[in-house]
Image (cartoon, rainbow, N blue to C red):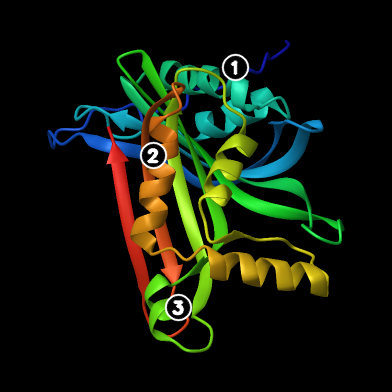
């Protein structure tokens, strides 16, 4: 007599998908700080390969106990190295569909490199900028924002006016977050901001370059208020810009605090 053993796998309970009775929805639930390789369009080189940090969230209705965290990771790995700015919106929509949610949010933060040429010596060096793609989708309608942090030099007009010798200056961060109606290079946002600072920054400079940049900043003093207004004026003049937030933070060299300003166009 032959005995047949059952090879069927018992069904595993889906705890996350079970009901919840507390009647409290969760606005965002998901994963934070997962790294994944991405490709980003580069105006001069075609594209550059970099590593991005992802935050991925969905809305969880009050009647569900939890979301399926593994599905977020599955979405990233499904795309492998094919994630790009152009495919970002599709990934956002895919996420809310796979997780059966009405709303979702993705942040993709990565270093972006620009090869810059020093103003006098002509030496070249790579300058890095922090860039974040922010995607939100609600009821099937996606919105995409690009956030760029641009380090610059700012020189104080008041210090220049009241001092017999020199003026205090400092490194500053100008952060621009935009939504656009048409394609816009990341480099265009960077160049727009740098042109409105007291001076732009470089990774590598020779002595003649340092002299040139120091004098350029001295001839172009700006308060933190000047910087955000001048950048906002440039954004207002660009028909591709649908909305924006401009922030400037000066890491003051003669104070133990920062100066800060912000302008929003909803």
Q: Viewer-proximal residue, 208 or 8? A: 208
Q: Residue furthest bottom?
A: 164
Q: Is residue 45 above or below residue 248?
A: above
- Spatial CA distance of label 2 from label 1 is 68 Å
Q: Position of residue 70 (x, y in %)?
A: 52, 34
Relative to 228, 150 lies left or right: right
Q: Picture coordinates of residue 164 (x, y %)?
A: 47, 89
- Name which of mark 2 and mark 1 comes first in the sequence: 1
Q: Residue at x 43, y 15 (%)?
A: 97
SS for tag 3?
A: helix
Q: Which residue is mark 2?
A: 233
Q: Residue at x 56, y 20 (%)?
A: 183
Nearest to the eye among marks 3 and 2: give it: 3
Going from the N terminus, do you reach mark 3 or mark 1 first?
1
Q: Which residue is mark 1?
A: 8
- The percent coordinates of residue 74 (x first, y second) are 59, 28
The image quarter in which residue 136 lies:
top left
> Does residue 245 appear anywhere in the picture?
yes
* Nearest to viewer (mark 2 / mark 1): 2
- Disc 1 is placed on an element classified as loop
The label on residue 156 is: none
For disc 1, the neighbor class at 10 Å (few under 14, some 14 to 19, many from 20) is few
Rendered position, 213 above or below 266 = below
Residue 160 - label: 3
Is there any visible trace of residue 15 in the rendered image?
A: no
Q: Quadrant of the C terminus?
A: top left
Instruction: Using the image as rendered, state which of residue 157 and residue 44 is in the foreground.
Output: 157
Residue found 73% across the figure and 72% down from its top:
210
Disc 3, disc 1: CB below 8 Å? no
Q: Residues within 10 Å of mark 3 (few under 14, many from 20)?
A: some
Q: What is the spatial separation of the Cα atoms under label 3 and label 2, in whole angstroms?
A: 25 Å
């Amino acid at each position: 007599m032959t005995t047949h053993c059952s090879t069927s796998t018992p069904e595993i309970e889906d705890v996350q998908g079970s009901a919840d009775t507390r009647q409290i929805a969760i606005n965002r639930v998901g994963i934070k700080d997962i790294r994944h390789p991405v490709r980003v369009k580069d105006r001069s080189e075609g594209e550059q390969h970099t590593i991005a940090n992802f935050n991925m969230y969905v809305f969880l209705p009050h009647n569900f106990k939890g979301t399926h965290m593994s599905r977020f990771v599955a979405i990233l790995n499904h795309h492998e190295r094919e994630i790009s700015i152009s495919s970002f919106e599709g990934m956002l929509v895919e996420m809310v569909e796979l997780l059966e949610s009405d709303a979702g949010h993705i942040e993709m933060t990565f270093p972006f490199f620009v090869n810059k040429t020093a103003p006098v010596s002509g030496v070249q060096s790579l300058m890095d900028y922090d860039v974040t793609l922010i995607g939100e989708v609600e009821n099937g309608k996606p919105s995409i924002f690009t956030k760029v942090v641009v380090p610059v030099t700012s020189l104080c007009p008041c210090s220049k006016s009241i001092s017999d010798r020199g003026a205090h200056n400092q490194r500053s961060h100008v952060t621009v977050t935009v939504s656009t109606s048409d394609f816009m290079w990341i480099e265009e946002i960077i160049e727009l901001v740098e042109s409105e600072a007291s001076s732009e920054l470089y990774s590598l400079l020779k002595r003649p370059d340092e002299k040139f940049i120091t004098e350029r900043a001295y001839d172009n003093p700006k308060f933190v208020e000047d910087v955000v207004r001048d950048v906002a004026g440039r954004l207002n003049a660009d028909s591709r810009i649908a909305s924006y937030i401009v922030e400037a933070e000066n890491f003051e060299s003669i104070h133990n605090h920062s100066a800060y300003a912000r302008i929003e166009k909803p």
